Amino acid sequence: MGNWLSIYRRIEIIMGQKNYNSLFWKISLVFFLLLATVGIAYVYTSHTSSKEYLEEVNQRLNHDTAKNIIENSTPFYNGKVIKPALEEMFHHVMAINPNLEVYLVNPKGNIIAWYPPEKKIHKNKIDLLPIKSFISDKSNKLIRGDDPLNPSSKKVFSAHPLTMNNMLYAYIYVVLNGEKNQTTSDNLFTSYLWQISYRTMAITLFFTFIIGLFIIRIITKNHSIILKVMQRFREGDLTARIAIDKISSEKQLGEMFNEMADILTKNIEKLKEVENLRRELIANVSHDLRTPIAIIRGYLETLQIKENSITPEDRKRYIDMVQESTIKLEKLINELFELSKLEANQIKPNKEPFIISELVNDIGTKYHIIAQNKKIKIETFLSTELAPVLADISLIERVIQNLLDNAIKFTPENGKITLTTEKCVNNTVKITISDTGIGIPEKDQERIFARYYRANNYTDLKNSTGLGLAIAKKILDLHDSTLDLKSTENIGSSFIFKLKCST
């Protein structure tokens, strides 16, 4: 068995080096070893069974051999061995079958005499139990006894008691397969097994192995298809998927791989997206922070250079400019990080039911003073019959604030901003923030929600970071909602979004 395992490992190494279909060849090799083992076991079993069968036939055919020997001669008289009678008995045996081995055994199992006399026995006492079993057995089953010439083996025999006047004098013990006969029988039997093993068994195993390989090939064909797709995926083809209709017997395995590949591909895309966001954030930060930092540095250097000659009015103006740039810088940094977190899905909405009209009214009230400073009027048309919406109240507040900031920035003096809430279809609430501002050109409307994008007529806004609408849209994406725009240049714009009701 150790040799078989050694051969198996060597073949496995060779196959692995040549990049064969390892599963097919491994199964084939195991199948071959199994067939070889079965063949060996079959030959061994056949050998043992056939040998026992032949011995049983021999014992049955020669069952009365010992009895016939006794009937033709009696080597005892008054309890003593009569040598001429014994020689006559042995002569009779030689005439019947010269290959027989005959032993005269006393009632204690000791060998008194034997034939042929030229043989040297190696065991002077034999076990009487098989002899007694043979004599008393009526079923003629196979019984083996000791072989005085070869103590390590057991042989079939014939036995019969030698009695006179109902008195047991000895046993005639005849070994049917004598040493010479055994050699001839073994040679013939070996030749017979050779024919079985190398003809019948070889042909049977050969065709069984070929048919088995064909069946194994059919079974492992689907695995080969799957392995090829996996190899393509491993080499970087992220679009590689298993065609389920071609591997019906391995459908579950194919579906599992496709699902795993989809998950891995999505994760890789997310990692790429995060990496792109990181690079974009670094680029944006380095670009957008440069201007306010340059302004702050410039005014501070001016204050240092003109420390003794600057007027109090100029000093206050310079300090105000530094403070204004610092506020813009802080706002820009906060919005950059907020948008980056939203785009990387690091912010999870904590949804809870609340009345949207109350939130819109509170925010409108807070912005009333800011709007008044620009001579802008804020009007609200809020429905009081709305069901509570299910959303993150702080994030939705941020959306409304950004949209109001945007409306105030782009609405001229004496303009108007309108906040509206109303019931909509599919159990949703619609929120609309409209203004009478400068509007957005049609060519810019599709790109208005991108970060840092400003339409051509927005360039005069020095305090705008260009991130408000992008942040609002990302927040609404987290709520499975959209931010829609309706705008006409020089007339005004309306931003609309919907939220699902909690009931």
Image (cartoon, helix red, strand yellow):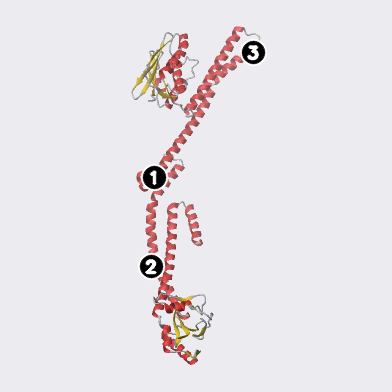
**Residue beneath label 3, please?**
305
Q: Splitting the image into 4 quarters, where does residue 415 fall?
A: top left
Q: Badge 2 is on which residue? A: 200
* Earlier sequence position, callout 1 versus callout 3: 1
Q: Is residue 477 above or below residue 25?
A: above
Q: Residue type at mark 1: give it.
A: Gln
Which comes sooner in the sequence, label 3 or label 2? 2
Outermost residue, right side = 308
Which three-letter amino acid code belongs to the residue tagged 2?
Thr
Few, some or many residues within 10 Å of mark 3 (<14, 14–19, 20+)? few
Q: Kindly indicate whether the residue at mark 2 contacts the one at mark 3 (C-beta within 8 angstroms).
A: no
Q: Amino acid at mark 3?
A: Ile
Q: Residue at x 51, y 23 (%)?
A: 336
> Which element type, helix, strand or loop, lies under badge 2?
helix
Query: Which residue was labeled with disc 1?
Result: 252
Q: Is residue 216 visible?
A: yes
Decide which of tag 1 and tag 2 comes sooner along the chain: 2
Residue 112 pos. (x, y %): 51, 85
The picture places residue 118, in percent across and down from the top left corner, at 51, 86
Q: Which mark is residue 171?
A: none
Q: Position of residue 88 (x, y in %)?
A: 46, 90
SS class, disc 1:
helix
**Separation of marks 1 and 2 at Cα, in angstroms:** 42 Å
Using a 10 Å C-alpha cutoff, classify the residue at mark 2 as few (fewer than 14 neighbours), some (14 to 19) or many (20 or more).
few
Q: Nearer the viewer, residue 68 or 192?
A: 68
Residue 194 visible within the image: no
Quarter of the image with the C terminus in it? top left
